Amino acid sequence: MKFFADTAIAEDIRELNDYGLLDGVTTNPSLVAKSGRSFVEVVGEICQIVDGPVSAEVAATDYDGMIREGRFLAAIANNVVVKLPLTLPGLKACRRLRQEAIAVNVTLCFSANQALLAAKAGASYISPFIGRLDDLNLDGMALIRDIRAIYDNYGFATEILAASIRHANHVKEAALAGADVATIPPAVIRSLANHALTDKGLEQFIADWAATGQTIG
C-alpha cells in the first residue's frame, strides 16, 4: 500500500520523505489555511520535495470554475493531481481533465455508488473518507471493501485512496481491505513504528551490549 502524507506542512513532508516512507502527498484548502501561506507557493514547494503525486484541491464548485482552476493547478508541476469534489459537476470536470491527461483525485466519497461513478468518469484516485463515516457509527472499512470488489469486478484502473484516517488501526484495516493508498497525518505515520515490546527489547539489547565493553568499528 502506498503512503501519502495528509498535510501541507513542508517540514513534516521532508522528514517523512527522508525516511523513505512517502509515495505522495494530499493537501486541501483547510490544511493550507493552517500553514498561513500562499496556496500556490505551498503546492509548488511540496511538489519539489516529493517525486510522487501531490493532490491539490480546487475551490470552485461549478464546472467551468473547476476546469479553470484544475488547469491552473496542473500547470504548477507535473506531479500535481487535481482534487475535485464528488458532485455531478465534479465528475463532469473529472472526465474533461482526464481527457487532457491531467490526473484527478475525486474526493469526499461516502458510498460505493459514488465510487463507481468516479471510476466511470476516469478518476485516477477515489478518496473514501473512513473517519467521517466512523463518526456517524458507519463502517468506513466496509466501504473500502465494497469499492475494492466493484473495481476488481470490472477492471477499473482508479486507485482507492483511503482518507480521513485517524489512527494506526485505520491504516492496518485499510491495507487489509485492499486500499491502494492511504493518506495519513504525519503523526499517525510516525506512530506506526511504535510498539512497547520494541522499546523494551531495544533497551535490553543496549544494556546487554554495554555489559560486554565492546565497540563496533
Image (cartoon, rainbow, N blue to C red):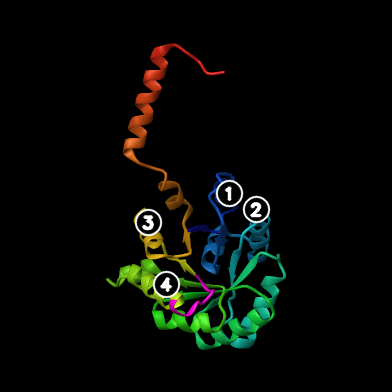
Of pointers 1 and 2, the one earlier in the residue sequence:
1
Distance of label 2 from label 4 (alpha carbons) = 31 Å
Q: Amino acid at mark 3?
A: Lys
Residue 81, relative to residue 17: is it above or below? below
Where does the image place residue 213, in percent across and percent down from the top left?
44, 11
Q: Residue at x 38, y 42 (%)?
A: 194
Of pointers 1 and 4, the one earlier in the residue sequence:
1
Q: Which mark is residue 49?
A: 2
Q: Is residue 195 left or right of residue 185?
A: left
Q: Is residue 102 left or right of residue 113?
A: right
Q: Secondary structure at mark 4?
A: helix
Where does the image place residue 65, in percent across and percent down from the top left?
63, 84
Q: Residues within 10 Å of mark 3 (few under 14, many from 20)?
A: few
Q: Which residue is mark 4?
A: 148
Of pointers 2 and 4, the one earlier in the residue sequence:
2
Q: Nearer the viewer, mark 3 or mark 4?
A: 4
Q: Which mark is residue 51?
A: none
Distance of label 1 from label 4 (alpha carbons) = 28 Å
Q: Amino acid at mark 4?
A: Arg
Q: Amino acid at mark 2?
A: Ile
Of pointers 3 and 2, the one earlier in the residue sequence:
2
Where does the image place residue 108, in percent across and percent down from the top left?
46, 75
Distance of label 1 from label 2 (alpha carbons) = 8 Å
Closer to the camera in the image, 22 or 74:
22
Q: Secondary structure at mark 3?
A: helix
Closer to the camera in the image, 138 or 98:
98
Of pointers 3 and 4, the one earlier in the residue sequence:
4
Where does the image place residue 147, in percent across and percent down from the top left?
41, 75
Range covered by the magenta-colored residues: 153-159
Q: Which residue is mark 3?
A: 172
